[in-house]
Image (cartoon, helix red, strand yellow):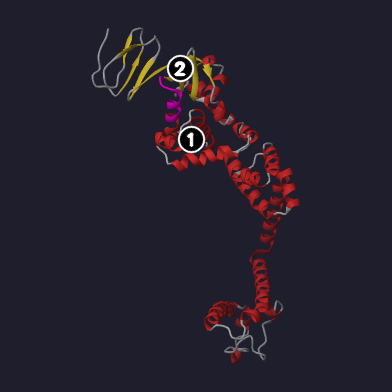
């Protein structure tokens, strides 16, 4: 039986051996095979049915990053409740090009399934890629996965960056940033990222900057990192130390990144243990040692900064900085006086000299402070 839908925006009709009508505007119909569904979204006709996994052409597998743990979790979900979300394909003769759903296909294979529920888009392949990217906000995409699809549109289908940006609803800078990252990565490094051996963050923020400066260091580091499992914090820490290291140290770092980070952790743990053992008293002594060294350095600068014929404004600026520091020392001294046990116990003995300063020639320091003078 035939029927018209004069005003239709989206229609899903289960095939039951007959004819399915689907038209977003004009009200036209199509024949649909048994066991399939047809979705009309806007003016796009999309059939949903089970297809043989062997019929899927994994043309864009190189744009996806392997996630073994997530694949196993998804496989467990499929075993319990089945495949919920269809994969997205476009028809190409007798086969289907898989656009989205590579993780689902891998999970289905892990479950021993031979078929996958697929949403078949009847449109050009480049149009489908654009729509996949435009939908990127609705799912978690890796930076490199987006970059790889953008490269397909830019290099294979010859779309300009501005055209791609307008089609996917993004700014041109969004497109150019991802394309720049993709072109900065070597094939070897991209393969490691696809296999999940190295994160996109580590590649873009650590390996690429090092490779730009010293290509052999970038290559060696990427190879060695692929055998480790380092956190983002550890990678950032590695780059920070690399920037400060000399040539010999850098060579050792890229050859043995795991060993280097282990030594850094050991130093941090030793420092933390020492700090815990010494307590606030130890920090007090360390801080004052630093201050003392800084004061010695400033003392050596006096003859150069306070010269004859110096501009009054320049001198006032220097003296203002000095007075602010002296004021801080005065406040510290007052606090020490307030809490010093020696002065509380000997208040009567020192009452006559309490108005003076510790810096006067006839003023003696309390023993416990004088020992650290």
User: Which residue sits at x=44%, y=34%?
Assistant: 136
**In 3D space, how far apart are the residues under numbered discs 1 and 2 (Cα atoms)?**
25 Å
Q: Which mark is residue 140?
A: 1
The residue stretch that appears in magenta: 121-130
User: Chief secondary structure of the magenta span?
Assistant: helix
**Residue 146 coordinates in the image, percent (x, y):** 50, 34
Residues 67 and 276: in front is 67
Judged by depth in the image, the label closer to the viewer, 1 or 2, is 2
> How busy is the neighbourhood of tag 1: few (under 14 within 10 Å), some, or many (20 plus)?
few
Residues 232 and 166: in front is 166
**Residue 102 coordinates in the image, percent (x, y):** 53, 25
User: Which residue sits at x=76%, y=51%?
Assistant: 248
Left or right: where 2 falls relative to 229: left
**Residue 83 coordinates in the image, percent (x, y):** 47, 21
Q: Tell which circle, 1 or 2, labels the residue nearer the N-terminal end.
A: 2
> How busy is the neighbourhood of tag 2: few (under 14 within 10 Å), some, or many (20 plus)?
some
Residue picked out by circle 2: 91
Callout 1–callout 2 Cβ contact below 8 Å: no
Residues 171 and 204: in front is 171
- Compared to residue 146, the image places residue 269 above or below, namely below
Residue reaching furthest left? 6
Left or right: where 351 falls relative to 227: left
- Compared to residue 94, the image places residue 361 above or below, namely below
Left or right: where 116 falls relative to 29: right
Q: Which quarter shows the C terminus?
A: bottom right
- Compared to residue 66, the image places residue 25 above or below, namely above
Question: Does the segment drawn in magenta span residue 126?
Answer: yes
User: Which quarter of the picture shows residue 70?
Assistant: top right
């Amino acid at each position: 039986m035939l029927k018209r839908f004069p005003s239709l925006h989206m229609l899903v009709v289960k095939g039951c051996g007959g004819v399915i009508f689907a038209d977003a505007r004009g009200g036209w119909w199509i024949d649909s095979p048994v066991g399939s569904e047809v979705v009309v979204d806007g003016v796009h006709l999309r059939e949903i049915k089970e297809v043989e996994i062997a019929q899927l052409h994994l043309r864009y597998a190189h744009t996806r990053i392997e996630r073994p743990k997530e694949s196993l979790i998804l496989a467990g979900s499929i075993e319990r409740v089945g495949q919920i979300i269809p994969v997205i394909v476009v028809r190409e003769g007798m086969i289907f090009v898989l656009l989205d759903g590579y993780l689902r296909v891998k999970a289905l294979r892990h479950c021993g399934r031979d078929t996958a529920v697929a949403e078949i888009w009847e449109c050009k392949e480049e149009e489908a890629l654009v729509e996949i990217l435009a939908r990127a906000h609705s799912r978690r995409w890796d930076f490199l996965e987006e970059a790889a699809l953008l490269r397909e549109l830019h290099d294979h289908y010859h779309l300009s960056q501005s055209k791609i940006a307008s089609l996917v609803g993004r700014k041109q800078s969004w497109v150019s940033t991802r394309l720049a990252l993709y072109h900065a990565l070597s094939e070897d490094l991209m393969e490691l990222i696809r296999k999940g051996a190295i994160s996109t963050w580590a590649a873009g923020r650590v390996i690429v900057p090092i490779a730009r400066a010293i290509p052999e260091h970038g290559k060696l580091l990427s190879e060695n990192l692929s055998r480790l499992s380092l956190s983002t914090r550890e990678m950032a820490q590695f780059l920070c130390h690399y920037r400060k290291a000399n040539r010999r140290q850098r060579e050792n770092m890229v050859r043995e990144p795991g060993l280097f980070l282990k030594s850094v952790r050991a130093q941090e743990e030793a420092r933390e243990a020492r700090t815990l053992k010494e307590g606030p008293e130890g920090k007090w002594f360390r801080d004052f040692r630093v201050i003392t060294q800084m004061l010695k350095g400033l003392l050596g600068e006096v003859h150069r900064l306070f010269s004859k014929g110096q501009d009054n404004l320049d001198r006032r600026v220097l003296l203002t900085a000095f007075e602010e520091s002296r004021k801080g020392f005065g406040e510290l001294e007052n606090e020490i006086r307030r809490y010093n046990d020696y002065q509380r116990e000997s208040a009567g003995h020192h009452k006559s000299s309490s108005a003076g300063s510790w810096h006067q020639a006839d003023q003696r320091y309390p023993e416990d402070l004088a020992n650290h003078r």
